[in-house]
Image: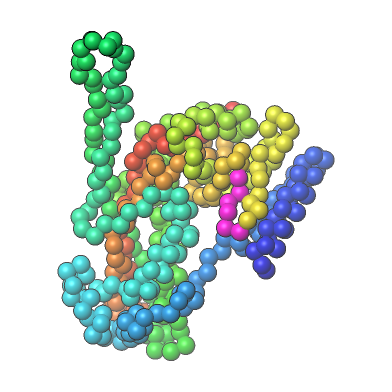
Amino acid sequence: METKEMIAQINNAFEHLKEAVEKKASAEEIDRIQNAIDDIELKMKRPNFAPNETKGEMTDLEKKELEEFKSYGRTGAIGETLGKKAMSSDSNPDGGVFLPENMSNTIITRLRKISPIRQIADVVTIGLGNEYKMPREKGKDYGAGWVGERQERPVTSNDQFEIVRIPVHEMYAQPQITQNLLDDTSFNFENYIADRVANRFAQLEGSAFVKGDGVNMPEGFLTNKEIEQIEAKLDFDGLLDLIYGLDAEYASGATFLAKRTTMRDLRILKDNNNDYIWQPSAQAGQPNTVLGYSVIEADDMATSGVGALPIAFGNFREGYQIVDKSGFVTIRDPYTSKPWIKFYTTRRVGGGVKKPEAIKVLKQKQ
């Protein structure tokens, strides 16, 4: 189904939803329409997991690396090109090799598509060290005042700086397949690895960036003690409190973040003029909006309910920092679980709040 047709179907379904709400239809009828909208949106967001369908042609070197990597997976023999990588200083000396560049890029691209926080946060890649450091003002106002023409100008106070440290943490995936499958030339080994690793890493990331405790994983913005929680109802007035709780300098580029079930609740909310505050996207690749701000789905956000934190709002590019440690590493293990061959793949990533004032969280009250 074409994307334009899907958008038209969503708009049509949303009109039916509004009619159902206005006529006070049964909860079952409203849920049926909501489910239809959800199904179409899921189809639109479904990522393409076909690593061979890339833009542009691979270079001769990339093709050679990929062929050597397939051979490495089947036989354990490291070819000349990958062998050079295996002996480099940033590779595992005990059998680890970097994934071929085009395959590594495919995994990174999938992470960006699947992990919602990557779409809106600031992302930096480091090559050395185990943490990313950045200076941050402590937030004190600079001193200033009025003076007469001939008055002495005393020294005014200024702000101080602190260092924000975001450590990187290791996540891993360890899929396994039999030697028979590896020997079968019809088996798409590189697709298998990319699918498993990309999906698992994206799930781990998405959860940690939202609610990670910072212990052996990134710190999520919901667990950060410096981010303000605004107590309000999940209604029009409560969303206004959340929006205007954010400083004007961060309003440009701000977005809502909510769980899919909470987004369903938002669809039927109205403003004081009895107009729906939800607006479905009218353009492919663009998110839906609430009160003029985009809404991003993140299923690691809490379910709505009294005392819960169902919605975050802010400029996440200003407020949240993701740190990638460059390079994927995979180790082929044919010994520990015969006849299975394990492919132990690791990736190092960090995440943390860099400007807490750029993000606000709604704490739902009765």
The quadrant in which residue 213 appears is top left
Left/right of residue 317 with respect to residue 9 in the rendered view: left
The quadrant in which residue 193 appears is bottom left
- In the image, is residue 274 above or below residue 208? above
Q: Residue at x 39, y 41 (%)?
A: 319
Left/right of residue 299 with respect to residue 340 in the rendered view: right
* Colour treatment of the image: rainbow
Q: Position of residue 217 (x, y in %)?
A: 33, 51
User: Is residue 303 visible to the viewer in this orientation of the structure?
Assistant: no
Q: Residue at x 52, y 29 (%)?
A: 244
Identity of the residue furthest to the front in this view? 149
Q: Position of residue 315 (x, y in %)?
A: 45, 41
Please count the marks in the image. 0
Q: Position of residue 50 (x, y in %)?
A: 49, 74
Specify start and end residues of the magenta stretch as a single range.
284-289
Q: Residue at x 66, y 49 (%)?
A: 280
Q: Main secondary structure of the magenta part?
A: loop
- Quarter of the image that includes the C terminus: top right
Q: Position of residue 19 (x, y in %)?
A: 80, 44
**25 falls in the magenta region:** no
Left/right of residue 197 with respect to residue 82 in the rendered view: right
- Quarter of the image that includes the N terminus: bottom right
User: Is residue 294 visible to the viewer in this orientation of the structure?
Assistant: yes
